[in-house]
Image (tube, grey):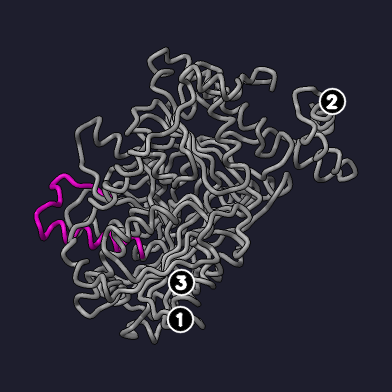
């Protein structure tokens, strides 16, 4: 059907409720809006759904959510009664319509004879991952759009290993979702009936307690924390999301007493009224927390995104370690913003160093990171004689590695990090965890404080040890039908006209993950990347520098990533500015 025919179908069909039809009648004169809502089905990708909330086939609503769920239910049903009885764990965040979508998801699964376990209120995404394994479920669903603007919501699917779906389950589920052609094929049932039949269940409260215990068990030096609990000052904001309760709870259990929460952002609110976007990657989201930090003279500032899988931080540069660098070139100085590569590397170095010192670093240990993450992760792995494994973009591929390690009895997972503010210490969950990152980061801060140092000092020590690895990124948003065409044209042009240098740095090799090729320019030798196919171009540059370009899998964006490695901070800053200029021009 054309988008106009789809629009009319939604207006006429008895399946859709009156509120939906009223919303659609209100746009009757807006041809562009009708087209955007109905020109396609909201794409169910390899992880699930994500889109703007509203009526229409290209929107997040109860109908598109349950249609996807019916496909998931059909796949689980094919696996047999054992899988149906194992059940599906369901969680949701603080976004608009999240509780409604979660309940509709559970009742659709129930109507297909599949047991569900749903949390009684909002929970972090990593706790959903943990709950899937703890409860022995066959799958999990979390309703979240992570750090996206308030008009978005999403739907992510996990499998029984606790990780987001990867091959073969992602492709199989995708195929089953595609087979659900009409909304009349979607099953549901009354809540009361589902409860009575034992299909609709609440997640036991013991799961929360067990999750907290796992978080605390990642601490390496509790005795160090005890020495500074009365002096170290922490400012925290959950950005109106799910991190508030668990983060405050674990900091309390660790013994930190000077924890100041940004009151204006403490309570859940899907409209995120105090920020443009609830994204800890964005410095704008720290305005209120930095004001509170200056008032309290805090040592560190922490922010978690709405589903608490990402952590962003600012650090007070008490010793003026970075005073003469670009990191201090901000009105917020002496508070310095750490990007995810800095934070992730800092925690990874601490964990490896201290576990090696106390004899708990496994001989067959492994560090994982994604192809658009700092090469500093590999430098750390090499320094501690650990296996380094690089994956496609998305933490689900790091979670998948943990599964492979267990199935194949090869390596012991130590640490994983990605450039988009996600990391995981330990394997208690299979997704990035901001709550766990808070635990380790505050331990590192305590360790430094015991030596009269700050996280800035620790970061500078790392640069001196490994080299000055600096990274940058730029996203360009191109919405709608025209935007999708523009994004594809950019990728096509780069493939047709290969780069041979970036900001004066020669290209050593080009990886095209779509074609599964790595071309070495000097010799013309072509090999395979060794990773699944993905629409990504990666340029290996001299001196461990690099650049990558990829369309986002969940947002209407094309993303550019780049990194350098220089012998001094000044040199790294200069070269990074030059690379940013090249990307801006592109």
Residue located at (41% from left, 46% from top): 395
Tag 1, which secondary structure? helix
Q: Nearer the viewer, residue 183 or 179?
A: 183
Give whichever of discs 3 and 1 has the lower sequence position. Answer: 1
Q: Is 48 left, or right, of 529 in this rendering?
A: right
Q: Do we see residue 527 in this rendering?
A: no
Q: Which residues are magenta?
A: 343-367
Residue located at (71% from left, 33% from top): 57
Identify the disc placed on residue 34: none
Discs 3/1, front: 1
Identify the disc placed on residue 295: 1
In space, the residues marked 2 and 1 are separated at their CA atoms by 58 Å
Tag 2, which secondary structure? helix
Looking at the picture, how far across and down is residue 458, in whole percent? Answer: 27, 73
Looking at the picture, how far across and down is residue 283, in whole percent? Answer: 52, 69
Discs 2/1, front: 1
Mark 3 Cα-neighbour bin, 10 Å: few <14, some 14–19, many ≥20: many
Q: Check if residue 366 falls in the magenta segment.
A: yes
- Most extreme residue toward the left, as rendered? 359
Which residue, given by chain and number where applicable, does mark 2 sit on? 12
Q: Quadrant of the N terminus?
A: top right
Residue located at (39% from left, 52% from top): 246
Discs 3/2, front: 2
Mark 2 Cα-neighbour bin, 10 Å: few <14, some 14–19, many ≥20: few
Which residue, given by chain and number where applicable, does mark 3 sit on? 576
């Amino acid at each position: 059907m054309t988008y106009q025919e789809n629009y009319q179908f939604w207006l006429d069909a008895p399946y859709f409720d009156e509120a939906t039809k009223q919303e659609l009648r209100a746009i009757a004169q807006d041809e562009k809006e009708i087209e955007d809502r109905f020109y396609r089905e909201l794409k169910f990708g390899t992880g699930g759904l994500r889109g703007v909330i509203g009526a229409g086939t290209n929107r997040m609503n109860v109908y598109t959510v349950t249609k996807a769920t019916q496909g998931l239910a059909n796949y689980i049903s094919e696996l047999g009664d054992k899988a149906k009885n194992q059940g599906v764990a369901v969680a949701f965040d603080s976004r608009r319509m999240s509780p409604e979508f979660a309940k509709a998801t559970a009742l659709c699964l129930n109507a297909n004879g599949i047991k569900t376990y749903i949390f009684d209120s909002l929970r972090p995404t990593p706790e959903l991952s943990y709950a899937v394994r703890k409860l022995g479920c066959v799958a999990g669903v979390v309703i979240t759009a992570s750090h996206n603007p308030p008009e978005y919501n999403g739907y992510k699917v996990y499998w029984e290993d606790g990780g987001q779906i990867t091959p073969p389950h992602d492709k199989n589920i995708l195929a089953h979702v595609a087979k659900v052609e009409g909304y009349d094929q979607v099953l549901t049932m009354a809540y009361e009936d589902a409860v009575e039949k034992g299909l609709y269940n609440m997640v036991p409260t013991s799961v929360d307690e067990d999750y907290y215990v796992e978080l605390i068990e990642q601490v390496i030096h509790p005795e160090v924390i005890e020495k500074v609990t009365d002096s170290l000052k922490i400012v925290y904001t959950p950005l109106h999301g799910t991190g508030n309760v668990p983060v405050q709870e674990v900091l309390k259990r660790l013994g930190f007493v000077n924890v100041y929460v940004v009151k204006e952002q403490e309570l859940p609110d899907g409209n995120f009224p105090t920020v443009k976007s609830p994204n800890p990657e964005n410095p704008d989201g720290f305005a209120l927390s930095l004001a509170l930090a200056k008032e309290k003279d805090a040592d560190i500032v922490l922010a978690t995104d709405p589903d608490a899988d990402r952590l962003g931080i600012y650090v007070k540069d008490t010793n003026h370690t970075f005073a003469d660098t670009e990191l201090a070139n901000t009105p917020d100085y002496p508070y310095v913003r750490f990007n995810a590569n800095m934070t992730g590397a800092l925690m990874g170095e601490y964990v490896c160093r201290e576990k090696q010192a106390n004899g708990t670093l496994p001989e067959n240990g492994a560090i994982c990171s994604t192809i658009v993450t700092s090469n500093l992760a590999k430098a750390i792995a090499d320094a501690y004689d650990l296996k380094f494994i690089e994956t496609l973009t998305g933490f689900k591929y790091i979670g998948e590695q943990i599964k492979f390690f267990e199935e194949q009895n090869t390596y012991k997972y130590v640490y994983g990090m990605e450039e988009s503010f996600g990391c995981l210490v330990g394997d208690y969950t299979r997704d990035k965890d901001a709550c766990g990152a808070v635990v380790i980061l505050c331990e590192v801060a305590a360790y430094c404080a015991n030596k009269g140092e700050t996280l800035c000092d620790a970061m500078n020590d790392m640069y001196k040890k490994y080299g000055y690895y600096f990274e940058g990124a730029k996203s360009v948003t191109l919405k709608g039908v025209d935007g999708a065409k523009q994004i594809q044209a950019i990728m096509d042009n780069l493939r047709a006209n290969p780069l041979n240098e970036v900001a004066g740095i020669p290209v050593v090799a080009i990886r095209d993950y779509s074609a599964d090729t790595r071309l070495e320019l000097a010799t013309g030798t072509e090999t395979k990347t060794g990773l699944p196919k993905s629409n990504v171009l990666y340029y290996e540059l001299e001196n461990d520098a690099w650049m990558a370009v990829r369309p986002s899998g969940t947002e209407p964006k094309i993303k550019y990533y780049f990194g350098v490695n220089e012998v001094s901070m000044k040199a790294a800053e200069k070269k990074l500015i030059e690379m940013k200029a090249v990307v801006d021009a592109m």
